Amino acid sequence: MWEFIGEYFSGSAADVIARCLLIIVLTLVYFVVFYYAKKRNLNMLIWIVCISLAVMFLFAFFNVPNFSFYVLVLFLLICIASLLLFAQDFRRDLFMKSRKHKMRDVFGEGTGREELQASVEEIIKACQKMSKTDTGALIIIGDNVADSILDSGTPVNARISADLLRTLFFPKTPLHDGAVVIMDNEVVSAGCYLPITQENVYPREFGTRHRAAIGVSEAYPDITAIVVSEETGIISAMHDGKVKRYLDAEQLREILYYAMGLSDEGEQERIWGWTPDEKE
């Protein structure tokens, strides 16, 4: 293997530079794949990439003929897979700032924070009122909501208010069965369809709304979902596949502050750290 490394970095200066650039590009591609695979909870893809890397090292160690050709083929396959799987995620991250930073950059810590806090209070007010009347609701909050989810619903693009949320979830209205999506501090879409979790470790009383909330949080770990149970009025929250139930106003406020970018990143572990009874 050391002979291969020595030969790889031998030759003219132009050849060495070109090979170093190839290593840098390959490293960046692998980083992108690992980053988005972890973000989308695609653990199987991570294992496939790790195994392919191990095989490449074995090829180099045993001086397999046409090693460079195999590396090039693997590189092209990973690039194609990345474009197919993560094009939407990459586009969003490339051309859109996160909501938290955007609010701080545009509005500063004053006006932007006050508007976000007002929105949080409106969401809490709506959830509490719907809880008292056993009105089912599903609200998802996040920057990276997939276009397929947004397109499955009806555009709203309205300011967040308790009255609007209660109207959207009012029984027998056309949009009450789907999810309401909140992005960039506004209600973007309503009546959206979400992926449903396939796990069977959750309580039996979890209906379609709960399972859809868990499913979207598993598929998109940055998203926070809030559910009001139609059967019991219990308010729950889901994030990265984790579940918190029986939320009061203060607990819901903490979760919404984190979801809306009002609390520090370090708050995630404190807010969403498991406790023994949360999955029972």
Image (spheres, helix red, strand yellow):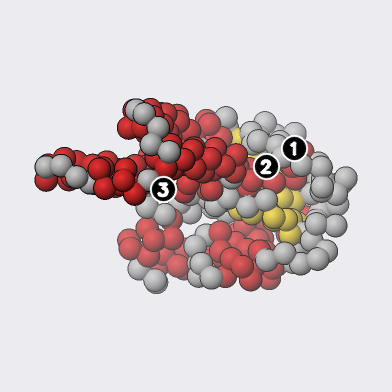
Q: Position of residue 135 (x, y in %)?
A: 77, 47
- The disc, 1 or 2, on the residue closer to the chain's N-terminal end is 1
Q: Which of the numbered marks, if any, corresponds to residue 198? A: 1
- Circle 3 residues within 10 Å: few <14, some 14–19, many ≥20: few
Question: Which residue, given by chain and number where applicable, does mark 2 sit on?
Answer: 215
- Circle 1 residues within 10 Å: few <14, some 14–19, many ≥20: few
- Circle 2 residues within 10 Å: few <14, some 14–19, many ≥20: many
Q: Is residue 115 above or below residue 135?
A: below
278 or 153, which lies in front? 278
Q: Residue at x 11, y 42 (%)?
A: 12
150 vs 215, left or right, is: left
191 or 208, which lies in front? 208
Q: Is residue 223 above or below residue 75?
A: below
Q: Residue at x 11, y 45 (%)?
A: 13
Q: Position of residue 258 (x, y in %)?
A: 56, 64
**Alpha carbon separation for disc pair 1 and 2:** 8 Å
Q: Which of the numbered marks, if any, corresponds to residue 71? A: none
| Secondary structure type for disc 2 | helix
Q: Nearer the viewer, mark 1 or mark 2?
A: 1
- The disc, 3 or 2, on the residue closer to the chain's N-terminal end is 3
Q: Residue at x 67, y 51 (%)?
A: 241
Instruction: Report which quarter residue 211 is drawn in.
Output: top right
10 vs 206, left or right, is: left
Q: Nearer the viewer, mark 3 or mark 2?
A: 3
**Alpha carbon separation for disc pair 1 and 3:** 29 Å
Q: Which of the numbered marks, if any, corresponds to residue 31? A: 3
Q: Residue at x 52, y 60 (%)?
A: 260
Does the residue at mark 1 contact the one at mark 2 (Cβ under 8 Å)? yes
Q: Nearer the viewer, mark 1 or mark 3?
A: 3
- Tell me the amino acid under the disc marked 3: Phe
